[in-house]
Image (cartoon, rainbow, N blue to C red):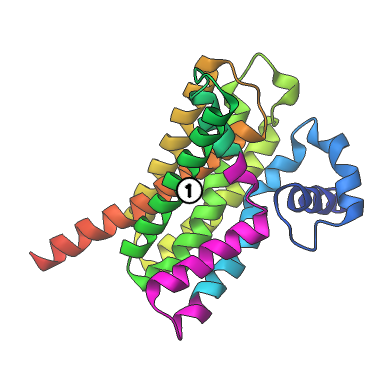
Amino acid sequence: MLSLQLRLLAIAIALWTRLPAGSARARSAAPACEGGGHELRYLPLAGLAVAVPAALAYAFAGLWLPHAVALLAALGTLLLLTGAVHERGFAAWCEDLAARARSERELTAAGAAGLVVLLLAKFETLSSIDPSWIAVSLVCAAGFSRGCAVFAMGSAFPEAPAQAPSGGDLIVALACAAAPVAAAAIWTDSVEVFGTAAGLALAAAVLVRRALGRRGLARDARALGAMQQLAELAFHVGILATLSIVDETSAD
């Protein structure tokens, strides 16, 4: 049983990151498990696996470089370690939203424009957060947003249950996603900050799920990437907004 769970974790890392743990053996075993969505239960842990190095990159870069440059180092590390797999899914979703465009070039432009706006929104949001909160925000957002995406994947398209994560997969994914957030809330004594961020992230994933459902899109990397990316952005926005309100209240 333990070996099966470790294998599923290795498959999740192989499919959704570019870390060395994504071995050729794990990749070769992926198709059999991917069909049932069982590897998705550990997608939040795959997110944590890439977010921790990104947080360390920010911390080390911040010792010598300005805040903005350190943030670019962190975001670049995330893109490098994930292979921009979720960003590509988000860009594809933006292309689908612009499906009435008359040419392939226009569709590509829509995807690129959406991705640029998303990355700029992430950067601007993080750059406005107090530097002492950046590392914990990166780690919690990476894990929780992926848990939100798995939750939405499991409930978005009931007409194709064979492709959906099972109830057990959803429970494991949500537990893996919520644990770091709960630990950070207790550690920082800021339940309201992380509670707001988590609520916004889940709401963002559900809204994208509804949009995908209306357009009849399949459950694939495009859907997962769109939900994960917007949930991650929403988590950062929640951190920023709540901290701003707390700071204003303290000043008064």
Asked whether residue 54 is in view, the answer is yes
Residue 77, quarter of the rendered image: bottom right
* Residue shown at 35% from the left, 64% from the top: 127
Say if residue 48 shows up in the picture: no
Q: Nearer the viewer, residue 186 or 155?
A: 155
Q: Nearer the viewer, residue 171 or 222?
A: 222
Q: Residue furthest bottom?
A: 64
The residue at the point 50 percent across, 15 percent down is: 214
Relative image position of residue 233 (x, y in whole percent) = 43, 48
Q: Where does the image place residue 90, in percent across and percent down from the top left?
A: 55, 38
Task: Pick out the residue farthest to the left.
Answer: 252
Q: Is residue 242 magenta?
A: no
| Residue with the mark numbered 1 | 232
Q: Position of residue 18 (x, y in %)?
A: 73, 57
Residue count near mark 1 (Cα–Cα under 10 Å), binned few <14, some 14–19, many ≥20: many
Q: Which residue lies at the image location 46% right of the left edge and 51% below the top edge?
A: 119
Q: Is residue 173 above or below residue 75?
A: above
Q: Measured along the vertical axis of the image, is residue 120 above or below residue 88? A: below
* The magenta segment: 59-88
Secondary structure beneath label 1: helix
Question: Which residue is more in the foreground, 88 or 181?
Answer: 88
In the figure, is residue 232 to the left or right of 199?
Answer: right
Magenta stretch, main secondary structure, is helix
Left or right? Give the position of 55 relative to 164: left
Which image quarter: residue 87?
top right
